[in-house]
Image (spheres, rainbow, N blue to C red):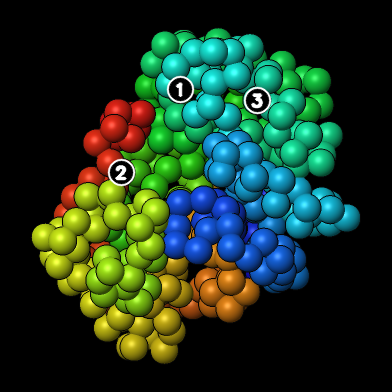
């Protein structure tokens, strides 16, 4: 697989989001052995950026990733996140310096490592100045427990203030054919030398064309509470999936590969992390590395109407900066 740069950090240009192996989606946590095989296959294919977080599960996803990477840590670029669980007794998001320190110690233990390669603040904590949060994280870099720092769903002012405190390597935010707000942030990221790591680059599976009804989801699947999957919005959003499928037929690729290739076309500093727990889907996603879309195909995809409905629930959107 080709490589990409997130700041000074080199990774395979397509990563792997591990959340759905344990958390949030239909069947999550039902096949840990299969998930381990998927992570092993990812490394075999040059998918090096493996993404997890303490809140996934909670905790069990980090333990799963740690088990999968045992003996292969040197092949992976391991990323995790802090801030959505408080270890200090606060309610809500907690990026206080003490919580950052406690969260990282727990993550290191569950992952079975002495350092993580990329540590993200999971969401901006409005009660803690970003300078204090990143200052505490920078102390962990100095101590050798973390290599690089990142942010997630932060907007431009926070990004600049954080970067002025300690270099930020990557911003992880939702970005795909139907979630395009990060187009406004990319110029700032490039000015500062920060890479973009899009999560949900396949629209939580919607852009693969395989989801035609919310009835496909288990009762505990988080997409049942996502506004984009509410019945009226769902029907309207099918047009985007249908257009991706049409371009895929023209390109001789799958819809998932085309949706990922569109994200990859945005630059060598953009590294999507599609999530899956299945080897076959992992191999399909990795195949997007070889898909070269024509200018005409890219224009058709650029013209796809972004999704109708918010990309998180109303309460979750309060933690996403805009």
The label on residue 93 is 1
Q: Which residue is mark 2?
A: 312
Q: Residue 37 falls in which quadrant of the image? A: bottom right
Against 2, residue 147 (above or below) is above
Classify mark 2: helix, strand or loop. loop
**Residue 160 screen position, x and y as percent:** 45, 23
Point 22% across, 50% down: residue: 227
Label 1 packing within 10 angstroms: few (<14), some (14-19), many (20+): some
Closer to the chain start, of discs 1 and 3, is 1
**Left or right: 23 as drawn, with respect to 320:** right
Q: Position of residue 292 (x, y in %)?
A: 46, 77
Mark closer to the chain start, 3 or 2: 3
Residue 146: which quarter of the image? top right
Label 2 and label 1: CA atoms lie apart by 16 Å
Corner quadrant of residue 185: top left
SS for callout 3 = helix
Q: Indicate the position of residue 244 as horizontal and vertical percent values.
A: 30, 75
Q: Nearer the viewer, residue 256 or 206?
A: 206
Residue 266 on image: x %, y %: 42, 57
Residue 153 placement, left or right of 46: left
Taking 285 as reference, is 138 above or below it? above
Per the image, the residue denoted by label 3 is 103
């Amino acid at each position: 697989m080709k490589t990409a740069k997130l700041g000074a950090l080199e990774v395979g240009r397509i990563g792997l989001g591990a959340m759905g192996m344990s958390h949030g989606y239909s069947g999550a946590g039902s096949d840990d052995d299969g998930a381990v095989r998927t992570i092993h296959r990812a490394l075999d294919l040059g998918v090096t950026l493996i993404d997890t977080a303490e809140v996934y599960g909670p905790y069990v996803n980090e333990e799963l990733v740690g088990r999968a990477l045992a003996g292969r840590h040197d092949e992976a670029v391991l990323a995790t996140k802090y801030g959505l669980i408080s270890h200090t007794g606060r309610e809500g998001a907690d990026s206080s310096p003490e919580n950052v320190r406690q969260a990282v110690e727990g993550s290191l233990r569950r992952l079975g490592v002495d350092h993580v390669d990329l540590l993200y603040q999971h969401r901006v904590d409005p009660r803690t100045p970003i300078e204090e949060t990143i200052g505490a994280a920078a102390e962990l870099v100095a101590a050798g427990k973390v290599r690089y720092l990142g942010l997630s769903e932060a907007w431009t002012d926070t990004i600049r203030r954080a970067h002025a405190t300690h270099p930020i390597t990557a911003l992880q935010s939702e970005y795909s054919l139907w979630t395009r707000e990060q187009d406004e942030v990319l110029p700032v990221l490039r000015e500062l030398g920060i890479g973009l790591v899009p999560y949900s680059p396949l629209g939580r599976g919607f852009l693969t064309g395989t989801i035609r009804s919310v009835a496909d989801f288990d009762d505990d699947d988080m997409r049942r509470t996502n506004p984009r999957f509410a019945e009226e919005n769902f029907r309207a959003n099918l047009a985007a999936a249908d257009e991706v499928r049409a371009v895929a037929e023209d390109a001789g690729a799958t819809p998932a590969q085309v949706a990922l290739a569109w994200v990859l076309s945005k630059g060598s500093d953009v590294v999507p992390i599609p999530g899956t727990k299945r080897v076959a889907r992992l191999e399909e996603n990795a195949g997007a590395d070889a898909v070269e879309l024509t200018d005409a195909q890219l224009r058709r995809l650029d013209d796809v109407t972004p999704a109708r409905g918010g990309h998180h629930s109303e309460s979750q959107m309060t933690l996403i900066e805009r």
